[in-house]
Image (spheres, rainbow, N blue to C red):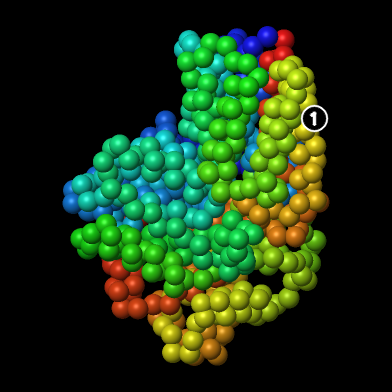
């Protein structure tokens, strides 16, 4: 079954719930190698996004993602606001005007989002950032036989990508100031990205 | 954690209410989005200067809004860069027809949000120049890091550019001057204790009672290395060594020496540090022509300090000495 507007709304609601639930976990991860605000910021941003979604009618899945993107850009700050904002804005723009989204179109949107994140953050795979979870998850989504299988595979791949950030030395963001001391800590941005895919699998496959 | 707050989520808004209550005669404060603007902005024909950054570094930046320094400041959440909306609103509020300069400290989030603000602002036809500060020698500047952090020199850039803007210099001249100040300044900081953000409630790092962290940032980021706490003279050597080597400063240079407190260190100790800095400067043949000592770019309640040296020329001195009237810095006015 393709993804429609209600799916997208449920996805964003679920992601907001995950950010609220895992706020302290993300703060702890970020305190170790950053400045300790990732969980607080993502939670604040997604609560603001839910308010914006409730305040106006969204025409299609692309519009839902664009509304969330604008709310994140204007309320989060830090690095996460522009990065998640760019990801969802690029995805929303790629999906613009389409009432129903299939696996292939969804993959194209994620690729646009990933390109946007790379350009905004000037980061690449292996720099110990959210890109390390995004890249394998999108690849897994693309390889799968159908959308539900793809979403499941993407969660697994995002989780592996997230875990794989632990031994890496950060090359971007505040964690990079630590140099070798950043190794041994899981990246908070890759962790919130894992929750984005987990929320997607729980809401979009139905 | 013990803090004088009402609720962790409200610290920025609550503090801004205090700023407005105290300084309502000189500032306009907006809350959606958070911006502190000098009351008489925009000043017609003058280059507008704005800056912004996470809260928790007071008096930077809001305390430097006023004649002779910034026209507006955008406070983010604690240690979190402000959003593009704030920067766009500030830019619009201070544009007196001569363009606006964004003074941005080199942190990933600050740079990205100011980039997005500049992209959003393009349609508004306000000419914007950006000065990026990156003076922290504790960070290796390489492809493998986010580059050097902007720290103490930011205060000096804001003051000197403020003087030049008041003097009627144009957008490109003020921006070039600011970049030159950044290029001639070097800083390094250290901590005796970590700080605690209201949202996390936990210390940003753990330090044993007899240890210090050398090369810290201003957001409770851990530094380059830690060691046993020695006398102030030794701490001053640890910070001055990398600063002097990096520019490098040379015998005969005229400098501004800035000893900055991180928020929890008494002035008594900052003056002890200044004495050591002055001694080391003299040993290297530097002449300290101007100085600044106090808490100007802080990291909540962290104990510690940073040292900034700026190589001076006559133009820097002229605009450093120019009148300034802000809650955080005031002379000649």
Number of numbered discs:
1
Image position, residue B167 (x, y; %): 22, 63
**The N terminus of chain A appears in which quarter of the rendering?**
top right
Name the residue at 66% across, 23% down.
A15
Front residue of this view, candidates B139 and A31: B139
Disc 1 crowd rating (10 Å Cα; few below 14, some 14-19, many 20+) is some
Report which quarter residue B322 is drawn in.
bottom left
Image position, residue B179 (x, y; %): 39, 65
Report which quarter residue A81 is drawn in.
top right
- Mark yes or no: residue A72 visible: no
* Circle 1 residue: A156
Instruction: Look at the picture and state if B304 lies above or below B280.
Output: above
Instruction: Look at the picture and state if B146 lies above or below A75.
Output: below
Front residue of this view, candidates B50 and B118: B118
Mark 1 belongs to which subunit? A
Horizontal side of A87 relative to B191 (left or right) equals left
**The C terminus of chain A appears in which quarter of the rendering?**
top right
Image position, residue A96 (x, y; %): 48, 20
Disc 1, SS: helix
- Mark yes or no: residue B143 visible: yes
Image position, residue A189 (x, y; %): 67, 40
Name the residue at 51% across, 29% down.
A89
Name the residue at 56% across, 46% down.
A121
Q: Residue furthest left?
A: B45
């Amino acid at each position: 079954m393709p993804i429609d507007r209600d799916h997208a709304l449920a996805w964003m609601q679920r992601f907001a719930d995950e950010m609220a639930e895992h706020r302290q976990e993300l703060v702890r991860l970020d305190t170790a190698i950053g400045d300790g605000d990732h969980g607080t910021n993502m939670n604040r941003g997604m609560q603001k996004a839910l308010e914006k979604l409730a305040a106006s009618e969204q025409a299609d899945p692309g519009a839902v993602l664009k509304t969330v993107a604008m709310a994140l850009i204007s309320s989060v700050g830090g690095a996460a606001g522009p990065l998640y904002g760019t990801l969802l804005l690029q995805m929303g723009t790629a999906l613009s005007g389409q009432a129903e989204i299939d696996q292939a179109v969804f993959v194209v949107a994620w690729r646009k989002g990933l390109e946007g994140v790379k350009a905004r953050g000037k980061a690449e795979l292996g720099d110990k950032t959210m890109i390390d979870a995004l890249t394998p998850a999108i690849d897994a989504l693309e390889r799968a036989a159908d959308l539900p299988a793809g979403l499941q595979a993407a969660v697994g791949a995002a989780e592996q990508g997230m875990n794989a950030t632990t031994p890496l030395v950060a090359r971007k963001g505040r964690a990079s100031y630590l140099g070798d001391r950043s190794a041994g800590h899981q990246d908070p941005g890759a962790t919130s990205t894992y929750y984005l895919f987990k929320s997607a699998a729980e809401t979009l496959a139905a | 954690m013990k803090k004088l707050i009402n609720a962790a989520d409200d610290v920025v808004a609550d503090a801004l209410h205090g700023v407005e209550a105290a300084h309502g005669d000189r500032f306009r404060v907006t809350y959606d989005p958070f911006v502190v603007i000098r009351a008489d902005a925009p000043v017609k024909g003058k280059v507008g200067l704005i800056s912004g950054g996470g809260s928790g570094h007071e008096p930077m930046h809001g305390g430097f809004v006023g004649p002779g320094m910034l026209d507006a400041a955008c406070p983010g959440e604690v240690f979190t860069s402000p959003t593009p909306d704030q920067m766009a609103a500030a830019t619009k509020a201070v544009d007196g027809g001569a363009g606006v300069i964004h003074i941005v400290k080199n942190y990933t989030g600050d740079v990205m949000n100011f980039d997005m603000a500049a992209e959003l602002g393009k349609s508004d036809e306000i000419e914007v120049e950006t000065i990026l500060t990156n003076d922290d020698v504790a960070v290796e500047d390489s492809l493998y890091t986010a580059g050097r952090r902007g720290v103490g020199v930011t205060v000096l850039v804001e003051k000197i550019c403020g003087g030049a803007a008041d003097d009627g210099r144009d957008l490109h001249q003020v921006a070039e001057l600011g970049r030159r100040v950044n290029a001639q300044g070097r800083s390094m900081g250290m901590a005796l204790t970590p700080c605690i953000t209201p949202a996390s409630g936990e210390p940003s790092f753990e330090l044993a009672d007899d240890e210090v962290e050398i090369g810290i940032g201003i957001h409770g980021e851990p530094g380059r290395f830690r060691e046993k706490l020695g006398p102030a003279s030794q701490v001053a050597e640890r910070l001055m060594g990398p600063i002097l080597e990096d520019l490098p400063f040379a015998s005969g240079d005229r400098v501004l020496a800035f000893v900055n407190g991180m928020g929890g260190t008494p002035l008594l100790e900052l003056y002890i540090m200044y004495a050591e800095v002055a001694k080391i400067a003299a040993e290297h043949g530097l002449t300290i022509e101007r100085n600044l000592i106090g808490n100007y770019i802080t990291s909540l309640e962290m104990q510690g300090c940073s040292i900034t040296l700026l190589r001076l020329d006559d133009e820097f001195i002229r605009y450093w000495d120019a009148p300034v009237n802000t809650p955080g810095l005031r002379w000649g006015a």
